[in-house]
Each structure stands twice: as structure tokens, then as C-alpha cells.
Image (cartoon, helix red, strand yellow):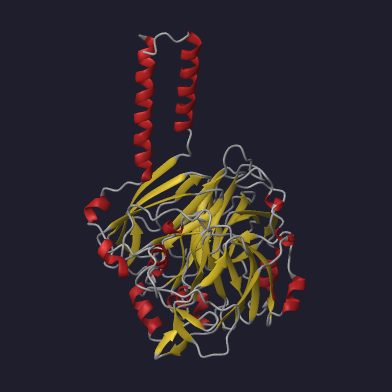
């Protein structure tokens, strides 16, 4: 083969083939999961009930990956109703098709499967996933997402001796179907029946308040070691104060951003939020210690019964935890929680997913190009049905997802007319979407006119929390903004009768959900979407395994073809194998 050519040509050609082979094999790793979402029986609060599990687990498995890995999750829906999983905080760069909310995906029908495939591009940190439709998160279906640093980027703290994920959240004995029916009928959720730790009820710290026979969580630890605790509030609507008896919580990260490292004796964690703490096992082992999550901003007298308690157990502990729980914050002090929230700041000198310091993105020096002041209100009757609103609009989810409607030019599905400020008109139900400009730098102010704390999330981005205060936001409020080290995250709380301001750089093409994280507010319509179009480099094309519904239902292929779908990674692997076989055969020819 190639006879007559000089030997150095053979060598050059071989070197080129080996180089191509190296490139072919050097892509970011893939990790595959097979998940079945189904109802299982559990007794979190001592009463047997139906919960949503994944592969028979409640909570579901932890998705443990590293920056830039590709994740393939084949999800089979064994529930009795459609569902989607959303990946709270995963930015899905240029790929909102994988976001798993009603505006981006058709639901996975009962008995069907769908394969998510996404890259955790340029992200680190602590997040979680959950079912996004029909109030299902109130019955479980959630689990953790841990994105580790690449080896080339050191942690901004000493490597911990262990990594522990804690899911805290309010829990109701009623099913998610019963709860959503109550909400539709204008019946408030009321105080939860309990607070869970990792799907388990409270340790019996008080015989009068906690029934016997309830399984509780024990966190095992070695004395002298330091552990990273990733704590997620996966609940329905209750803010929780998290604390560990006699132990400091050194805050190091929240939702993909390393923070200025500060010690807290307790921290308020609001619905949808995630935090990482370093906790040193530096106390004596005379007894175990309480781990507590107690409700905040709950007006009900029953709130004392709704305290989550787990146990921290040193391996050389001499006895069980006992005595009173560590004190919660003073509930009559409205400023404690807000002051604490303002103290959480970005570690501008630390590197995260990339080698450059987080603070190299100087958000405070960028000119704001658009401003949205979003007002909420308590639930109200609109056309005879209960709704919640943002700026007087209750979002109506169309039968054809926004993404598909835009891709296939289906008219009349949504309007790009969401207002920049509250309009002087009656509240209405509509599919109104924010018309975002690619690479615009947008200021969003959430004005909470409700009597309860609200929490908001934006898919596709990390935004900078730059200010919050009680009262009505005005343009003069900008003088109080933190323009240097406001933390970048994807969830923020807005206190009742107060405002919170965020800044976000719209550099990620797609249609992205902006929503209330409190399930009652979200379910009744307190959400919208931000449409961001890059005319030069659009987002990724429609996935080959897309489920079609609404106006595009005739395009739907049979289920058998999608059951066999295993993601582009399999095709990529096949191409690699063919290429390697070709190289090997060429090498064999040269060797003859």
C-alpha cells in the first residue's frame, strides 16, 4: 500500500492518524442512567402513603458528575399521569430542549420513556432535580445533582473527608393530587404535617410532639474529620432554618458559586435553594447531636409540631441526643433573615468551573439594557378560577410547548409581549412571554405584594442577587445595590412586603422558564418564559427523540422507536469504533 513513497511519508501519515485517533477519543466523558419513575409505598411520618420514587428509591439517586461531562438519563414514566423531570440550576447551554418544563417539552405520557441528554457545561456545585408538572414534587421524585471540579481547578478550601447530601422539605400526608385539587378550589395549604430529612420523619426528641415508630435519618461521622454537607430545600412552600447542635456551618458554595467563607450557627434555606457547608466534627462524643430544620415565616400555631430532626452520630458517641433542640431565630425579628441573606457574598478570587477567578466577570461595570419590575399578588379569582399572577398575568401553558411552536412556526401559541412593569388593567390569563435580546444585560426586580415569602428561579442562567429590602422598590433603590460580590445563583427569596433585585446576562439562546418555586404559586400561574434568540448561532436543533404534542401531535412516531433511543452518545461511540478499526487496518497494511 502506498508503494514508492519515502519512509518519512509513512511516518508522517501514521503520526497524523494517531493524532486524529487521540482527538476522537479525547471528548468529554458520558455517564448513563436508566431511571424508572413510579409510585412506591413509604411512611415518612408514620402513616403509610404513596410517594414518587426513582428506581424504587425515595429520594431518588444522586447524579454525581464532573464539569463538562455529558449526562444521558433514560426516564421511564410508570406513574398514572404525564410527567417531566427538570434539572434545577443546570444551565443546558444552547439546549433548552433538555430543560424538562411545560414550555420546552411535551410531557412523557404514562407508560412511555424519554431520554434526556445534556452537558453540565462550565458548571460546578450543588443542585437537584424534580418532577415539574402537576404538583408532583409534593409527592417526591426529587434527587441531588453534584457537579465536581475538574482536577486542574483546585477547591478554594481543603478537600473534605466526606460528602453528604441532605434533602430537607415540608411534607403533607395528602397526595399531590389532593393538594392540587385544594389549590384549584382556593383552599390554602396550611401548615405542613412534618419536615423530612432525606425522606424520613423526625427523631423523637419530644415524646409529646413526635410519635413513636417513625424512621429518622442518622448521619454517621468520624471525630476530627470535616464533611461537606450539601443541603437542598426540596419542599412545597416552607422556608426552613437549618442548624446542627453545637456545630458551626462554614458556608462555601451555593448553586454553583463559591461564596466568601463565613460561619453560621444556622441558615434560612428557602424553597428551591441549595447550599454547601463544611462542618468539622470537633465536639466531644458524650452524646449524639441534633440536626434541625424548622419552619420559618409560618403563622400557624401548629408549626411547632412541624420540625424536622435528624441525628449526627460520631463513631465514638457515648449516648443518644437529648435535651431541648437548639434555638431557632427570633420569629418576631423580620430583619434577621434578610440581613443573613445579604451577608452571603461571591468569592471573587476563587476559580470555579474555569481557571479564571469568578470575579473576573465584573457584572457591576456592565450597562443595563432592559428592566423588568415583576409584581406578584395573592391568589385571586380570574374568570371564576383561582390564579396567581406576575405583573397581572397568570401564565397559561399551551398544549404545544413554546420551543416547538417557535421551531415549527406555529402561529398563535404565545405572545412576546410580557410588560416591563405592572399595567393598569385587570388581571388576566395569557401565554405572554418576555422577549429577551441575546447578550442583553437585564435587571429584574421582584416585588412581593403577598403576605408570604416567595422564591423565584430562572432556568438557563445564574443571576446576580444585588439587592433586597422591605417596602416598594424605586429607582433610588439602586443606590443600595451590591455591584461587586453579589452572589451568582439561580434561586432567590423575596420577603413579604419587600423586593429583591437581580442582574442577568442573556448569553444562552433558548426559551427559559422564570417561575415561582413555591408549588402553590407556580401551579396557579406565577411564571413566564424568557425567549432568547441568537440570530447567528441558534440553539441546538430539535432532538431526534422529541415527543410531539398539541398542534404537532401528527408528527409523533411510535413509542417503539423511542424506547430504543439511547442518545447521540451511542452514535458517537459507534463512529469512534469504526474510525479506530479503520486506523488499525491501515496500520496492519503498513506492517506487512
Q: Residue at x 73, y 61 (%)?
A: 364
Relative image position of residue 278 (x, y in whole percent) = 62, 51
Decide: is 314 above or below 553.
Answer: above
Front residue of 553 and 305: 553
In the rendered image, which quarter contains the C terminus?
A: top left
Relative image position of residue 581 (x, y in whole percent) = 34, 25
Q: Residue at x 42, y 77 (%)?
A: 396
Q: Residue at x 26, y 59 (%)?
A: 112
Front residue of 370 and 316: 370
Front residue of 63 and 16: 16
Relative image position of residue 377 (x, y in whole percent) = 54, 84
In the rendered image, which quarter contains the N terminus?
A: top left
Relative image position of residue 206 (x, y in whole percent) = 50, 69
Give the side of residue 89 with respect to residue 284, left or right. Answer: left
Residue 220 can be seen, yes or no: no
Decide: is 503 above or below 223.
Answer: below
Amino acid at each position: 500500500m502506498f508503494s514508492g513513497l519515502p519512509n518519512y511519508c509513512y511516518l508522517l501519515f501514521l503520526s497524523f492518524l494517531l493524532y486524529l485517533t487521540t482527538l476522537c477519543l479525547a471528548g468529554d466523558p458520558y455517564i448513563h442512567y436508566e431511571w424508572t419513575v413510579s409510585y412506591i409505598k413509604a411512611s415518612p411520618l408514620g402513616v403509610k402513603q404513596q410517594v414518587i420514587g426513582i428506581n424504587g428509591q425515595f429520594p431518588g439517586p444522586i447524579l454525581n458528575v464532573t464539569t463538562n461531562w455529558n449526562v444521558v438519563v433514560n426516564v421511564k414514566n410508570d406513574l398514572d399521569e404525564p410527567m417531566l423531570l427538570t434539572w434545577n440550576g443546570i444551565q443546558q447551554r444552547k439546549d433548552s430542549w433538555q430543560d424538562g418544563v411545560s414550555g420546552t417539552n411535551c410531557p412523557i405520557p404514562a407508560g412511555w420513556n424519554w431520554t434526556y441528554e445534556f452537558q453540565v457545561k462550565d458548571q460546578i456545585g450543588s443542585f437537584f432535580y424534580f418532577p415539574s408538572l402537576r404538583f408532583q414534587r409534593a409527592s417526591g421524585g426529587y434527587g441531588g445533582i453534584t457537579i465536581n471540579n475538574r482536577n486542574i481547578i483546585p477547591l478554594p478550601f481543603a478537600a473534605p473527608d466526606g460528602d453528604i447530601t441532605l434533602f430537607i422539605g415540608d411534607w403533607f400526608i395528602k397526595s399531590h393530587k389532593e393538594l392540587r385539587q385544594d389549590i384549584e378550589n382556593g383552599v390554602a395549604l396550611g401548615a405542613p404535617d412534618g419536615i423530612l430529612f432525606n425522606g424520613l420523619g423526625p427523631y423523637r426528641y419530644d415524646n409529646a410532639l413526635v410519635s413513636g415508630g417513625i424512621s429518622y435519618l442518622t448521619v454517621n461521622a468520624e471525630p476530627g474529620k470535616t464533611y461537606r454537607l450539601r443541603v437542598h430545600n426540596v419542599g412545597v412552600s416552607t422556608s426552613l432554618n437549618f442548624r446542627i447542635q453545637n456545630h458551626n456551618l462554614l458556608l462555601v458554595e451555593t448553586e454553583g458559586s463559591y461564596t466568601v467563607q463565613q460561619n453560621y450557627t444556622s441558615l434560612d434555606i428557602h424553597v428551591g435553594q441549595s447550599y454547601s457547608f463544611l462542618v468539622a466534627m470537633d465536639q466531644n462524643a458524650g452524646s449524639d447531636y441534633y440536626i434541625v430544620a424548622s419552619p420559618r415565616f409560618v403563622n400557624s400555631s401548629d408549626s411547632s409540631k412541624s420540625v424536622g430532626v435528624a441525628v449526627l452520630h460520631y463513631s465514638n458517641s457515648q449516648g443518644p441526643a437529648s435535651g431541648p433542640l437548639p434555638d431557632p431565630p427570633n420569629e418576631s425579628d423580620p430583619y434577621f433573615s434578610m440581613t443573613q441573606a445579604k451577608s452571603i457574598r461571591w468569592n471573587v478570587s476563587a476559580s470555579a468551573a474555569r481557571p479564571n477567578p469568578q470575579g473576573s466577570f465584573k457584572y457591576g461595570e456592565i450597562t443595563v439594557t432592559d428592566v423588568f419590575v415583576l409584581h406578584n399578588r395573592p391568589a385571586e379569582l380570574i374568570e371564576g378560577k383561582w390564579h396567581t399572577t406576575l405583573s397581572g398575568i397568570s401564565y397559561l401553558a399551551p398544549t404545544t410547548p413554546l420551543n416547538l411552536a417557535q421551531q415549527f412556526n406555529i402561529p398563535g401559541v404565545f405572545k412576546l409581549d410580557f410588560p416591563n412593569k405592572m399595567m393598569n388593567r385587570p388581571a388576566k390569563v395569557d401565554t405572554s412571554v418576555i422577549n429577551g435580546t441575546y447578550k442583553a444585560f437585564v435587571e429584574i426586580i421582584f416585588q412581593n405584594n403577598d403576605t408570604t415569602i416567595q422564591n423565584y428561579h430562572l432556568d438557563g442562567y445564574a443571576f446576580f442577587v444585588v439587592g433586597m429590602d422591605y417596602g416598594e422598590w424605586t429607582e433610588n433603590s439602586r443606590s443600595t445595590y451590591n455591584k461587586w460580590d453579589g452572589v451568582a445563583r439561580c434561586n432567590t427569596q423575596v420577603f413579604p412586603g419587600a423586593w429583591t433585585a437581580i442582574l442577568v446576562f442573556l448569553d444562552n439562546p433558548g426559551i427559559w422558564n422564570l417561575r415561582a418555586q413555591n408549588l402553590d404559586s407556580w401551579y396557579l400561574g406565577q411564571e413566564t418564559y424568557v425567549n432568547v434568540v441568537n440570530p447567528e448561532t441558534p440553539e441546538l436543533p430539535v432532538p431526534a427523540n422529541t415527543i410531539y404534542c398539541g398542534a404537532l401531535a401528527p408528527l409523533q412516531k411510535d413509542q417503539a422507536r423511542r424506547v430504543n433511543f439511547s442518545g447521540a452518545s451511542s452514535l458517537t461511540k459507534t463512529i469512534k469504533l469504526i474510525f479506530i478499526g479503520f486506523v488499525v487496518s491501515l496500520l496492519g497494511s503498513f506492517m506487512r
